[in-house]
Image (cartoon, helix red, strand yellow):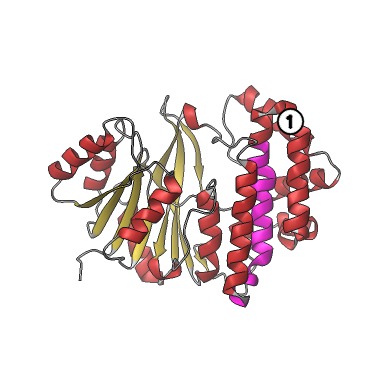
């Protein structure tokens, strides 16, 4: 039996500027019983040679390096790591090479997961401007510390950032769930939605243990009009996954419907409209048609209702307002306000 309890999967592509800092973060972790699975995704720089030198230099770290022959993106790289790891331990976590887990990151996540026997253990994080070093926001630090999804109102989970880097996952809830689907885009959200119905216990650490760096080249992500059909197919794939897994998954359908409205109807569609302003009307129309056809209950979804919204603070009320604008064909007004407000405050607002 391997002497580690956590497998860390880390994709790398053109990451030569980040690997030194990342290895330093790993070396500083106060919890030591982990293995790192690096998946090299055919970079155009010297990432691989730098990585191999660091693996030799940090001989006390348990590192494995897998090389993919073709660049396929973050999702497929993570799947490659999962499918090729010789041994899957009790816990999994997926980190990004350009971020910074704080020294107690793994220790506190693992300790709470063991104490609570949680299937999913989540910590808070800071969003930091990579150029200025200024903290943009501190997020996910006001959660129900012991959340049991079964039979409960899942509306609060709709608003959780689905990114995987602040989530320690018990490996037995993953099973056949994978990041990639035909096309691949928005993989974290798809993966999170697939594993959630198997999570009987969720525990939160309401303190920021991870620094997520927002780079100017990735601000507001790269969602554009051409990517939207791929995201449509991704959420259709998730729904088919729910159907395949039967009633235990389908009881989460209201969650999935609201989750799709937030991530696709608001987030991805807004970004696509801002990048393609001339096609805004067409983009909103196509998204509305997709929601009506594939997730038709979004118009009356209980997790998007006014009464559900007022229980959970400002963000759910804002989502309720966006749903109303969709219903009256006025979502363009939200996009106008969002664009104007972010230009005035000169700050990216996470949707």
**Extreme front residue here?**
69
Using residue 202 as the reference point, say whether residue 117 is left or right of it: left
Is residue 140 visible in the rendered image? The answer is no
Residue occupying image coordinates x 40% and y 55% = 79
Expressed as whole percent of the image width and height from the top left, the position of residue 91 reads: 35, 64
- Say which residue label 1 marks: 279
Using residue 56 as the reference point, say whether residue 114 is left or right of it: right
Using residue 289 as the reference point, say whether residue 55 is left or right of it: left
Q: Give the vertical position of 108 relative to 50 (above or below).
A: below
Expressed as whole percent of the image width and height from the top left, the position of residue 289 reads: 78, 49
Q: Nearer the viewer, residue 334 or 40?
A: 40
Q: Give the vertical position of 212 relative to 88 (above or below).
A: above
Is residue 16 visible in the rendered image? The answer is yes
Expressed as whole percent of the image width and height from the top left, the position of residue 6 reads: 30, 61
Disc 1: CA contacts within 10 A as few (<14), some (14-19) or many (>=20): few
Expressed as whole percent of the image width and height from the top left, the position of residue 162 reads: 52, 52
Segment tinted magenta in the rendering:
247-270
Asked whether 258 falls inside the magenta stretch, the response is yes
Quadrant assignment for the C terminus: top right
Q: Give the vertical position of 348 relative to 186 (above or below).
A: above
Q: Give the vertical position of 173 relative to 231 (above or below).
A: below
Disc 1 on helix, strand or loop?
A: helix
Quadrant assignment for the N terminus: bottom left
Q: Predominant secondary structure in magenta?
A: helix
């Amino acid at each position: 039996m391997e002497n580690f309890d956590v497998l860390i999967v880390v994709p790398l592509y053109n990451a030569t500027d980040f690997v030194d800092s990342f290895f330093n973060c790993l070396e500083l972790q106060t919890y030591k019983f982990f293995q790192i699975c690096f998946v090299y995704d055919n970079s155009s720089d010297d990432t691989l040679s730098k990585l191999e030198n660091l693996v030799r230099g940090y001989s006390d770290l348990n590192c494995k390096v897998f090389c993919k022959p073709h660049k396929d993106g973050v999702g497929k790289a993570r799947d490659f790591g999962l499918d090729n790891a010789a041994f899957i331990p009790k816990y999994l976590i997926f980190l990004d090479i350009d971020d910074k887990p704080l020294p107690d990151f793994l220790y506190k996540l693992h300790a709470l997961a063991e104490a609570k026997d949680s299937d999913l253990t989540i910590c808070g994080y800071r969003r930091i401007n990579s150029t200025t070093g200024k903290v943009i926001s501190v997020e996910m630090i006001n959660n129900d510390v012991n959340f049991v999804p079964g039979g409960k109102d899942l509306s609060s989970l709709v608003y959780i950032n689905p990114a995987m880097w602040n989530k320690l996952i018990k490996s037995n809830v993953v099973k056949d769930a994978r990041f990639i689907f035909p096309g691949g885009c928005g993989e974290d959200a798809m993966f999170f939605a697939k594993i959630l119905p198997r999570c009987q216990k969720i525990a939160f650490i309401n303190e920021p243990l991870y620094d997520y760096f927002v780079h100017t080249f990735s601000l507001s992500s790269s969602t554009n009009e051409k990517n939207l059909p791929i995201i449509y197919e991704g959420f259709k794939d998730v729904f088919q996954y729910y159907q395949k897994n039967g009633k235990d998954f389908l009881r989460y359908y209201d969650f999935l419907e609201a989750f799709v409205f937030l991530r696709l109807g608001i987030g991805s569609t807004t970004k696509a409209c801002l990048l393609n302003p001339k096609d805004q009307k067409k983009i909103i129309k196509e998204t509305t048609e997709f929601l009506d056809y594939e997730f038709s209950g979004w118009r009356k979804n209980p997790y998007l209702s006014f009464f559900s919204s007022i229980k959970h603070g400002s963000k759910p009320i804002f989502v309720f307002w966006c749903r109303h604008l969709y219903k009256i064909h006025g979502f363009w007004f939200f996009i106008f306000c969002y664009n104007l407000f972010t230009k005035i405050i000169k700050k990216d607002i996470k949707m």
